[in-house]
Amino acid sequence: MNKFTYPNPRPKLVIEYTGGGMISNCYDYSTWKITSTNRLNKETILAMNKLGLVGFGQEFFIRSQCDDKEPWAGLDVVECVETTQQGVVVPGVPINPYSGKPYAPCQMPYFEYMCEARCDSGD
C-alpha cells in the first residue's frame, strides 16, 4: 500500500553567519541566525554556543525571543506526495482514497533566532 506524506524540503536546523565587525581596536562581534523547524529554548542555543557552533568569545547574546512562546518566522507550503513502500515518489497529484479529492497543501512553520557573540583580540 502506498503512503501519503508531506516532505518538508527545509532542513531541520541551519546555522548561518550573518555578519560582524569591530566594536573597538581590540574587540569585535559576529552575528548569527539559527533557523529551525522546531522551537528552540535558551538552553539549547547556549549549548550550541558552548560547542562552538554559534560564535565564540567572552560574551554571547540571544537577540530573539526563545521561551517556547515565540511566534514562527514563516510558513512553508508543502505539497503532499504519494510514495511506494520502497520510497519512490509516484508521479501526479495524490488523491485521498476516502474523499476522492486531491490532498491539500500543508503549512509548516519555521523559527528564526538571532544571536551575537563578542570577542577580544586575545581569543
Image (cartoon, grey):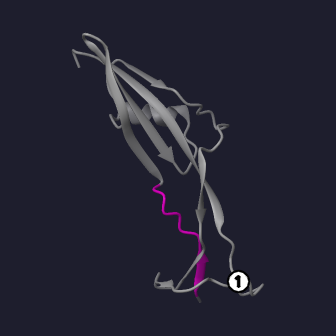
Which residue is found at the position 67% from the left and 85% from the top? 95
Left or right: residue 99 versus residue 31 is right
Where is residue 82 drawn, in percent x and y? Answer: 57, 81
Task: In the rendered view, tell whether residue 24 sits above or below residue 30.
Answer: above
Disc 1 secondary structure class: loop
Where is residue 53 drawn, in percent x and y? Answer: 35, 38
**Dominant secondary-structure state across the stretch colored magenta:** loop
Quarter of the image that includes the N terminus: bottom right
The disc labelled 1 sits on which kind of residue? Answer: Asn
Where is residue 23 drawn, in percent x and y? Answer: 34, 14
Left or right: residue 120 versus residue 18 is left
Q: Which residue is label 1 attached to?
A: 96
Where is residue 71 drawn, in percent x and y? Answer: 66, 41
Q: Quadrant of residue 119?
A: top left
Which residue is found at the position 44% from the left and 38% from the top? 33
Q: Residue furthest left?
A: 122
**Residues in magenta?**
2-11
Task: In the rendered view, tell whether residue 73 sits above or below residue 29.
Answer: below
Which residue is found at the position 47% from the left and 81% from the top? 87
The answer to whether residue 75 is seen in the rendering is yes
Few, some or many C-alpha atoms within 10 Å of disc 1 (few <14, some 14-19, many ≥20)? few
Quarter of the image that includes the C terminus: top left
Left or right: residue 87 versus residue 58 is right
Of 105 and 38, which appears nearest the observer?
Answer: 105
